[in-house]
Image (spheres, grey):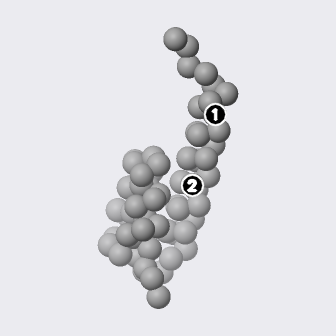
Amino acid sequence: MPISWEVIAPLVVLQLILMAFALTSCIKEEETNGPKWLWIIIIVALNLVGPVLYFIIGKKKY
């Protein structure tokens, strides 16, 4: 069964938007919960789960 790009393309675009938003947020933050370089690796390496983890755990709450 071939892969339907009409289904996958929106998911890929949403994942890339979420990753870009999480990376810019992480870079702009002065402090994060844990080392910033580690959060950048997690955001990029864990695709959809990484940015969600960053917003739940990594971002400092003031």
Q: Which mark is residue 9?
A: 1
13 with respect to 60 (left or right): right
Residue lying furthest bottom: 62
| Name of the residue lying farthest toward the top | 1
Residue in the foreground of this view, choosing between 1 and 35: 1
Q: Find residue 61 and report its image quarter.
A: bottom left
Q: Is residue 42 above or below residue 9?
A: below
Q: Is residue 59 above or below residue 1?
A: below
The answer, for residue 43, to whether it is visible in the render is yes
The residue nearer to you, when weighing 34 against 37, is 34
Q: Amino acid at mark 2?
A: Leu
Which residue: 40% across, 48% down?
46
Viewer-proximal residue among 18 and 38: 18
Residue nearest the viewer, comparing 32 with 55: 55
Along the polypeptide, which appears first: circle 2 or circle 1? 1
> Circle 1 sits in a helix, a strand or a loop, which is it?
helix
- At which x and y percent is residue 32? 40, 76
How busy is the neighbourhood of tag 1: few (under 14 within 10 Å), some, or many (20 plus)?
A: few
Residue 32 circle label: none
Res 18 label: 2
In the depicted structure, whether residue 6 falls above or below residue 53? above
Q: Residues within 10 Å of mark 2 (few under 14, many from 20)?
A: some
Q: How many marks?
A: 2
Percent across and percent down for residue 58 are: 39, 70
Q: Amino acid at mark 1?
A: Ala
Q: Residue at x 65, y 38 (%)?
A: 10
Q: Of helix, strand and loop, which one carries label 2?
A: helix
Look at the image and tell me whether residue 36 can be seen.
Answer: no
